[in-house]
Each structure stands twice: as structure tokens, then as C-alpha cells.
Image (cartoon, grey):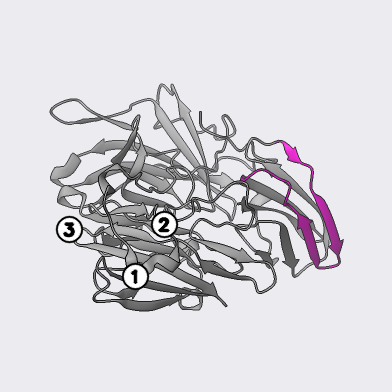
Amino acid sequence: MKKVYVALCLLISGVASAQMVEDSISMSAGYQNQVWYDFETGTQTEVAKGDYELSFGVESGFSSSIRFNHSAGALLWTYPNGTVADWSTVETNGLSTWEKNYDSPTNWYQGAFDKADPTNQFDLGWGQYDMTTHQVMGDSIYIVKLPNGAYKKLIIESLISGVYTIKYANLDGSSELTNTLAKSAFSNKFFGYFSLTNNEVLDLEPAKDQWDVWFGQYMDLAPTLYNVTGALTNPNHLTNEQIGISDPSTYTDFSQGTYEAERNVIGYDWKTFTGMAFAVTSDVVYFIEKENGDIWKWVPTRFDGSATGKAVFAKQKMSSASLSEMANVQLEIFPNPVITNLVVNASERIQEIKVYSITGAQAQVEVAIENHNAQLAMGNLPAGTYWLEIVTENGNFAKKVIKN
């Protein structure tokens, strides 16, 4: 069952009079490209899916998620026979029986490297967080099969002062390389990218506020984990899927349904392969709420399959929702993901903060507020996605937080 975020308070200001506009993207033949798409401008940013294997969370504060790109055929395993102390003696007997690591289909911030021990609040999966130094030190070895068939052993050695350190080598220890990826090199981005094949740091995605939907191949439940082709929404967006709409082209009621925080609400199942071609679901409408409050309608109309990788759709800007409007207030929230204590800094005086689970239920959290700053004790909350309703002198705001 999909988790849902019941909008804290969608204040509808009326439906825009603009008409639907048709547009399309192409992932190229064989789905060789990934595409970031911006509703407002129609801008498309294309990247070859095999350009990178790793993507690192680079948002300000304590973002530490690390994702793995399977779309070009790369594979990832956690080494089960030792820790980083066993780097020189790694062997892969029984590899075919090891469980592979995959990114979460639903959450951008639960990557293949983030499989933590739920009983240890300081375990981030790939490393251990130190409350005193605020550093993460890697404690796990990984085995990687690259798209070219080569095998590597890999350690994320550390995250210190916003800089990730990566070490990898051939399985026998030869050709060992170390590189770093600094968050500061990726201003206003969600992720920074790294190619193990080329030992190269890459800046690939558009700025956070310059894309809405990503198109490409990713792992999802279909019904078991499978490399599917579909659409994922921006981490700061909410998506409302409405099914059973008799005429999607004229339907405009974005106040119905629920707005979900999961990235794959659009996903892959808006189309079905009939044996000869793809048929697009004819009774579905998606409404996407952006962080700035804009709401866009998105309706898929055609999918050409692997011959061209082309998806055709109609879009329409609908309205705004007041809770998300930023009204020139600057907010800083860290660490995110959070383990125990969350800090909120604002350019305006903070009056109140409430925490909601992804189901819309208010969570019981101790909140200490002092003028422009607040601290939330979130250590006792279950891991998952939460929403903050932040009340300031200059408006109310919603911010998403990941609890590890």
C-alpha cells in the first residue's frame, strides 16, 4: 500500500484558466538517457544512463544518503564476510548467493548504501555517525559489478565537513583509487554524481527548483524488483494520482484525492505493454504540488517504447497552495536525514512547529523554540518521512524531513 501525505491544509485559490499544453521527452532508443523535465519552461536535461554509478546526497546540513545506479546493468552487494579492516583480504566466493542492494523505489533518500541497523540510531548503513565530531566513518565493504563487467571492491571511507571520501580497487587490490566529492561543489542540488568507471565527479542534475519530473529506468516492484521505465517526481514535490476520470483533458479538481510524498506515485504503471505496443492508461490524472505552492496537472497520452524512448504528455498550470509559499522567509533545517535532534533556523521569528507523519497524523515531538531557532527531539520517532509545519511571523511553511 502506498503511504499518503494528507495535505496539512491545501488552501485553494482557484483554477488557472490556462489550457493544457502538449509536450514530450525522449530517453532515446533503448532508454539510453535519463531526462529531468521542468514544467514551467519545458527545459529538458539529458544524461546518458551509464555516465555514473553513485549519487551522493549533497544538500546543506547532514545529508548522507548514497544511491546506486542500476539502469545500465551495474550491480551492488554488501560484503558479508568482514568490515573495512578486511579490505586487503576480500574474496567473493559465494557471490551469486549474496543479496543485492537496491535503492528504495519510493524514497529518494533511502539509497542502496543506506541499509542501516534499525536498532542502532547512529548506523547510516555505509557508516557510523559520531555525535561528538558530527562525522560519518565508513564501516562496510561493497562489491560492485560495473556496466562493462569489471568487478570492484569499494568503501565509502568518510563524510567529514561536507566531503565524502571514496576508495575502490580491483578485487585483488590492484589499481586502487581514492577520490573525494564535496557537497559545496553542488550548489542548490539534491545529489552529486560519481563515475567509478572513469574515476570522475560529475555535476549532472539541474538545480532543485528547475526540474519537476525525472524520466528513466529505475528499480521498482513490478511486482518484484525489476528495472522499469517510468517517471519520478522531485523530492520536494507532492503528487496526487486520481484514477477513473472520464475525461482527463478537461478535469481540473485538484482538491480531491491525497497528495503523496513518495517519488514513484507516477511511476511506471501509467502504461501497459500489449504485446505489440504500449497503451497509456486513459482515465488517470496527476496533480503535482511544487515546493513553491504551484500545482501542475500532468496527463500521459502516448508512450513509444524502446524504439525511441519517447513519452508524450499534456500539462497545465492549475493554482497555488498557500502552505508551501515561501514569502521570502529563509529556512535552514539540519541534519536531514536526522537521527536524534533536528535544528530549524529561520530568518523570521518562529512561533510554532508541528510534526506530521506521512499519513497526516501529528507526531508527538518535544520542540524548544528560541526566537529564530528551534530544536526538535526526534530520536524516539520511527524511521520514515515526516512533514514539519513551521509557523513564523511571515507565514506558514511545510518542509519534508527524513528520520533514520
Q: Is residue 367 magenta?
A: yes
Provide the residue designation for mark 1: 88
Q: Residues within 10 Å of mark 3 (few under 14, many from 20)?
A: few
| Image-quadrant location for residue 369 | bottom right
The relative height of residue 312 versus residue 195 in the rendered view (above or below) is above
For the residues labelled 3 and 2, the Cα–Cα distance comes to 20 Å
Contact, mark 1 vs mark 2 (Cβ under 8 Å): no
Identified at 40% across, 59% down, the residue is 41
Q: Is residue 265 magenta?
A: no
**In the image shown, does 133 or 41 lie closer to the viewer?**
133
Residue 193 makes an appearance in the image: no
- Of tags 1 and 3, the one toward the viewer is 1
Give the image location of residue 235, x and y in percent. Answer: 50, 53
Q: Secondary structure at mark 2?
A: strand
Q: Which mark is residue 149?
A: 3
| Among the two numbered marks 1 and 3 on one chain, the one whose residue lies closer to the N terminus | 1
Identified at 45% across, 66% down, the residue is 207
Q: Please indicate whether residue 142 sits to the left or right of residue 173 in the image.
A: right
For the residues labelled 1 and 2, the Cα–Cα distance comes to 25 Å
Kind of residue at badge 2: Arg
Q: Residues within 10 Å of mark 1 (few under 14, many from 20)?
A: few
Q: Secondary structure at mark 1?
A: helix
Q: Secondary structure at mark 3?
A: loop
Provide the residue designation for mark 2: 67
Kind of residue at badge 1: Ser
Identified at 58% across, 33% down, the residue is 258
Specify the segment rendered in magenta.
361-383
Kind of residue at badge 3: Gly
Q: Please indicate whether residue 203 sits to the left or right of residue 290 in the image.
A: left
Contact, mark 3 vs mark 2 (Cβ under 8 Å): no
The relative height of residue 385 versus residue 49 in the rendered view (above or below) is above
